[in-house]
Amino acid sequence: MKKTYLFKLLFTTLIFIVTPLKHQSLQAQKKPNIIIMMTDDQGFGDIGMHGNPYLKTPNIEAIGKKGIEMETFITYPNCSASRAALLTGRYPYRTGVTAVTQVDHFMNNSEVTLAEILSENGYRTGIFGKWHLGDNNPMRPTDQGFQEALVHKGGGIGQAAGPVGNTYFNPILEHNNVSKKYTGYCDDIFTDATLDFISKKDDKPFFAYLATNLPHFPLQVPEKRAEVYRKMGLHEDNALTYGMIDNIDDNVGRILAKLKQLGIEDNTIVLFLSDNGPRQRRTKNDVYPGRWVANLRGTKTSVYDAGIRVPFFVKWPKHFEKNVKTKTMGTIIDIFPTILDIANIQAPDTLQIDGKSLLPLWKNKDAGKLEGRNFITQMHYGPTPFKYMHFAVRTQKYKLISPHDFPHGILYQPKDEELEEVLANLELYNVEEDPSERIDLADKYPEIVEDLLAKYENWFDAVTQERVSKGIQRIFLGAENSPNVNLSRFDWGGPRVISNNELGYWRVKTEAGVYDISMDLPKTTKDGVAHIKYQNVHKTIPITKDQKTVLFKGVALPSGVGDFQAFFKTGRLATGPLFVDVNRIITSN
């Protein structure tokens, strides 16, 4: 009997000893949580430690102090392209994304996103803030792997994609594809939702993508934030912008504090970056007085470094050394493969990834795969890329540039004479020795120019061929999971969109059925006629002066693909509506 008691005592003791060890072992094997915080138009100079004489950004900088700062991190010069590159690890031209509005920002739904792969591997996935890759099925965040989504429409609150009069205060947002009005300031609302998401208690790791729309235009921020900078004597635009960055920094601090409070800080990798440089100017006549840009050249939409070199900090306690700075070039297409590497997830063999994992560099191991690489960026307006127009090829040391002062004005295929002039005036900089890009070395090193130009030409042919083969992504009308669709001017296509933005059409794929179709009209000064056209369907309804809406009831639409047109005429020239709601009420079998 005594032996039995001793055996039971020994067995119980072993259970108590082994169970915690087993629990610790499971914890050690658990995949890490992932937080990516991306700001909107925050430049490299918009960080206190980068020499900004006015800003203090202690919480953002704390990520680097507890981890790594990449001092040479390169993105695309506009919002949508950088976001597509981050989520796919691919050059954005491959994905369908060239610019930021109309069809230029539509990411093809065949793209495999980071959220999709992480979801398939047991992660909870959530996005909070800015998506900007298409507002309708099949391009929404929930169509691309995000299980939880609280976002604004289009490229920013107050733009043509969202409700008229929407602002950063008490905005109408989309929660899992349902419009809802929220109370508070947008950046705080998105952060609150992120905190709720990461606080959820379950056995799954999470991927939280906090993509604030700050400090993007319009410059709206609580007065107390801006007043601090007004008292410094700053220009009003800078006071408002810095107030917005101050708000961002506070909310970064809230995220970091929550990780510590939840006891998950050590198993959470945190990344902070911006999508592109600051809007310091778009043309020679559009300048922020006194904006600090860390002596970098250019602005948002520019392929000079102020447009594409952004702040980047990352930490993963117990895995990365603290307070490390590296000048090795990282790029926006690297985040996708790096996160998969960290989570020990193999990407599908059929997936062509352009980026490279930064994990060896971050772990201070073999970073040889990053040596000798180049990163290519290009940006202009419209859905059709034009070879040689406004591009840059950046290596660790050199950068070849085809500059343009107003890339939004590159609308049509240039003539050969213009292309010859562009190629004769390419610029080359040693960005290691001349980060301000002031000393043009193109005449001194023509062989480097030719080598980098050849790399660009090969890249352009490859990425545009893939894009053309897929075509522009179509909006789904009448799909089972989105029978009600809101179309906006933000998603127009067509030649008049490029020239004057008063009329366009929507590239769609329809399910056969009966639809109610309503149009919200801009102010009309005369009586006229409203039209809808799709394939062989053409309906008209008379409208009167100052009429605000018009409803086409019970319209039978066929299945197929085509260009959906909605417009009105009060004279000979047609004008487009503000919004069109296309609601399927009966399904045709």
Image: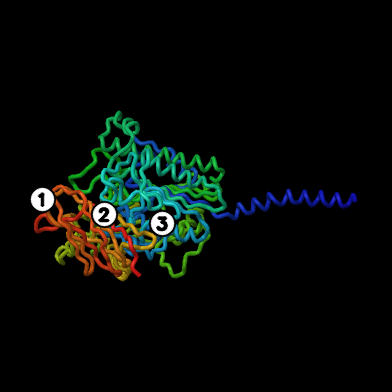
The residue under the point 30% across, 28% down is 231
The residue under the point 72% across, 52% down is 18
Quadrant of res 403: bottom left
Q: How much space separates mark 1 and mark 2, taking CA atoms?
A: 23 Å
Q: Nearer the viewer, mark 1 or mark 2?
A: 1
Expressed as whole percent of the image width and height from the top left, the position of residue 326 reads: 43, 50
Q: Which residue is mark 3?
A: 142
Q: Residue furthest right?
A: 1
Label 1, residues with CA under 10 Å away: few <14, some 14-19, many ≥20? few
Disc 1 or 2, which lies upstream in sequence?
Answer: 2
Quadrant of res 331: bottom left
Disc 2 or 3, which lies upstream in sequence?
Answer: 3
Q: Amino acid at mark 3?
A: Thr
SS for dot 1: loop
Q: Amino acid at mark 1?
A: Lys
Task: Answer whether residue 45 is visible to the viewer in this image.
Answer: no
Label 2–label 3 contact, CB within 8 A = no
Expressed as whole percent of the image width and height from the top left, the position of residue 195 reads: 47, 43
User: Horizontal placement of 437 versus 320: left or right?
Assistant: left
Label 1–label 3 contact, CB within 8 A = no
Q: Which residue is mark 2?
A: 488
The residue under the point 29% across, 68% down is 471
Residues 207 and 299: in front is 207
User: Horizontal placement of 201 versus 97: left or right?
Assistant: right
Residues 282 and 109: in front is 109
Quadrant of res 107: bottom left
Q: How much space separates mark 1 and mark 3, taking CA atoms?
A: 42 Å
Q: Which mark is residue 526?
A: 1
